[in-house]
Image: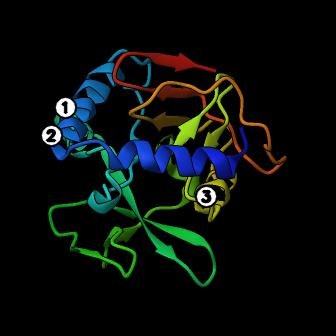
Amino acid sequence: MTKSELRTLYKTKRKALSLDACDDLSLEISNQLLKLPIWNKSFYHIFLTIEEQKEINTEFILNILSGKDKNIVISRSDFKTGLMHQVLLTDATTIKKNAYNIPEPIDGIPIPNSSIEVVFIPLLAFDKTGNRIGYGKGFYDRFLESCNPETIKIGLSFFEAETEISDIYESDIPLNYCITPKHVYTF
């Protein structure tokens, strides 16, 4: 299937989930994450959940990162440039939803992309070779391109892998892992 077809399909699948189901599946995903060999790193980038899109609830992962005393990095999206600006999440960080209902930091300590060692990536769908489909604006591709090549890229999905995404672009950056409630995919 194409990216466009898969985007439509997975938005519909997500819409059908109850909020309780989203929370239950999110907890299972966060428990699966504990199996990965990633916990010796220092800087972890994570997205904040867009509840209206029924995204994975990252609160569970944030709790794991805090409990392991990791540096948590979140981003603010610039829709004019298509870039994401990274900020260290601290107790003093003010979060506010933007016009697209994306929770973002209003202020904070800037963190260079080169410092980020692990990135948790929101997605709609992915395939068995680690290709992913997001919302189609390219924010994460541009962001990941500016990170170190060694940065670990982890997709988070309520659903299992598709066999193949037929229209992958050369600029698309594949995942190292994708975590679902039942599986850890390694690419």
Image point (37%, 59%), residue name: 74
Q: Is 178 located above or below residue 83 in the figure? A: above
Mark 3–mark 2 CB contact (< 8 Å) = no
Specify the amino acid type for callout 3: Phe
Q: How far apart are marks 3 and 2 (CA)?
A: 31 Å
Looking at this view, is 138 or 126 the one in front? 126
Q: Is 93 located above or below residue 11 in the figure? A: below
Q: Name the residue under label 1.
A: 24
Q: Mark 3 points at which residue?
A: 143
Single out the mark in the foreground, 3 or 2: 2
Numbered badge on residue 20: 2
Q: Position of residue 155 (x, y in %)?
A: 50, 36
What kind of element bears circle 2?
Answer: helix
Asked if residue 162 lies left or right of residue 26, the reply is right
Q: Distance between the residues labelled 3 and 1?
A: 29 Å
Q: Where is residue 30 in the image (x, y as percent from the top left)?
A: 28, 29
